[in-house]
Amino acid sequence: MADAWRMVARSHGGPEVIAREDFDPGVPGDGELLIAQEAIGLNFIDTYYRTGLYPAPLPTPLGSEGAGHVVAVGPGVSGFAVGDRVGCAHGLGAYASHRIVAAERAVKIPDGVSSEDAAAMMLKGMTACYLAEDTVDLAAGQVALVHAAAGGVGSVLVPWLRDKGVVVIAHCGSAEKAALVDADHSLHGSLADLAAAVRDLTGGQGVDVVYDGVGKDSWAASLACLKRRGLMVSYGNASGAVPPVSLLDLSKGGSLYVTRPTLFDYVATAEALAHTADRLFDRMQRGVVRAVIGQRFALADAAEAHRALEGRRTIGSTLLIP
């Protein structure tokens, strides 16, 4: 296909390894769709592939999340037609003008949800969905601590939980970000002081669950915020991978539980993916959650977008526009 291009990591390293290249996406095979992309979501997992934390062959096509319209349908595909607006948040290669994806990994974007909003929300929103609904189904009145509450996942998870009646304590890296979060309690103090602040807010009890996408830097503080038999949900490594865990620390903390989930285990089948996407789009259409697009970069400027993300200079979702 003429004029198709993408951004890849030529080697492992900093944002400077990201380069543009022309490519031919080919024609869709059995069970596949060719999508002309209109918007691409930037996610922290993209940096893990760029640095080599998550291994992939080099040069590595970057990105997993994008939305656009179908321009070709492969043999054996049902339920999709040329012109349909679709989103996909699976595999690699989203940093591209065109992309071939498995039809069973794509979802139709309903009326009332723009392609930009879908690209900004699919990965983050479906992550928020499984965290709030499937990893643990908190009841009204239970208490959750959400780290990086003004970030991509956090900005969706906080209102999702509050819609369920969960009491949310949000934590952000700055007062400016904390002011943007509509939580029951919004904190921005140091991680060293977090547990004391959380205990003060909960009458000394701690929280039922901590949602932590920060990783290494927040691990100890998160455990200290949990109530007896509380659940630690460690779903990201923004500050680096969590060090080896001592089971005795979990015992001393009050018979704590820990899980390290990933979205793809919660959308492993086409049915589970559709169910998760339907729940997300339902809440978007009802206004429970919304895409908070804090910044847009040209796809060709993906390296600068990575610098902003890693430098904690982004708010909400970031889009790359081909």
Image: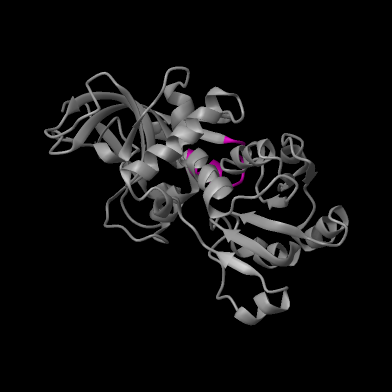
Residue in the picture at 37% in, 50% down:
17
Residue in the picture at 65% in, 82% down:
248
Position of residue 319 in the picture relative to residue 249 (left or right) = left
Q: Return the residue found at the far front.
A: 139
Q: Which residues are magenta?
A: 305-316
Residue 284 is at least partly visible in this image:
yes
Is 235 within the magenta? no
Where residue 178 sits: x, y (%)?
75, 40
Is 313 within the magenta? yes
Residue in the picture at 55% in, 46% down:
133
Position of 119 relative to 131 (above/below): above
Residue in the picture at 72% in, 73% down:
254
Quarter containing the C terminus: top left
Position of residue 169 in the picture relative to residue 216 (left or right) = right
Where residue 306 sits: x, y (%)?
49, 44
Where residue 206 sits: x, y (%)?
78, 60
Quarter containing the N terminus: top left
Position of 242 relative to 171 (above/below): below
